[in-house]
Amino acid sequence: MPGLGPRPVVAATVLGLRARQWMVVAAVLGCCYLMVSVVALTGAWAALNREPTNAELQRAANAEVARRWQAWPAGKIFPDRVGYSLGRGRSEFASRLGVAPQTTCQGAVDPEISAVLRRHGCRAVLRATYADQLQGVVVTVGVVAFADAWRADRAFRELPSAVLPDRSSGVRPALRAVSFPGTPSARFIDAARMDRTADRGGPYVMLTTSGHADGRPAAAVTKEHPGDPYALAPQLARGIARPLSQQALPDCSSREWRC
């Protein structure tokens, strides 16, 4: 019909925006995402490369000490020789006779102690037996491992303090004796346990049980021994616990540390 020309082309819109406007929006969003990514990567890099805080270092130190019962070799936990004092400035050395295989918390102690240890999360018990310098007294030392010092302290405080009257199985409840054939401890069995001690170092409870190398049963002893022949036992426990529980300066670059 006359007077009608071609109709104008109307640009398509989506949500009220044309194609060119959407290109601008996409470019702006891309820049925003890029900036967010840069900020996130920068923050991650800073977090990975910053110096650990004092709290993180303390946690790492505590965790490293609590893992030593697994990470350290037996000879480092139980040295060949441990010093002790007899008073009047006299010092002697106890010699290690053997190291027992790792034991469960139930198998290494009498039931009355086992119940306490398991209640507070005992992980394992490591034992070794020593003889005094004259090889007349033998001592089994037990390292009871816990997850942290708090659990170890709770268990230590709840250990039974009273000695049961029946001495047919030695002084008990106590750490069970470990003997090694061909050594002065060969006759040292539970029935020969004459004395016991308990202490704590960090996340470890230290138990000892002592007796004579000749294996004489506790039930046969009716008189008090002169002096204190078992005074070396708690000293051996402390001598073993000291390096085992002493915190070292964290080295976050080492695989042994988790900072």
Image (spheres, rainbow, N blue to C red):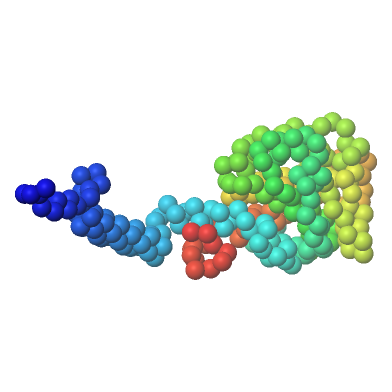
Q: Establish if 158 lies above or below 86.
A: above
Viewer-proximal residue among 160 and 74: 74
Q: Establish if 173 lies above or below 245.
A: above
Q: As drawn, is 6 to the left or to the right of 226?
A: left
* Residue drawn at 87 percent across, 55 percent down: 179
Could you tell me how many numbered marks the image carries?
0
In the rendered image, is residue 85 in sight? Answer: no
* Residue drawn at 13 percent across, 54 percent down: 6
Q: Where is residue 212 in the image (x, y as percent from the top left)?
A: 86, 52
Q: As drawn, is 76 to the left or to the right of 11?
A: right
* Residue drawn at 24 percent across, 58 percent down: 23
Viewer-proximal residue among 223 and 45: 45
Q: As drawn, is 239 to the left or to the right of 94?
A: left
Residue 195 position by quadrant: top right
Q: Position of residue 105 (x, y in %)?
A: 76, 44
Viewer-proximal residue among 18 and 100: 18
In the rendered image, is residue 116 in sight? Answer: yes
Q: Position of residue 80 (x, y in %)?
A: 74, 67
Residue 243 position by quadrant: bottom right
Q: Where is residue 232 in the image (x, y as percent from the top left)?
A: 73, 54
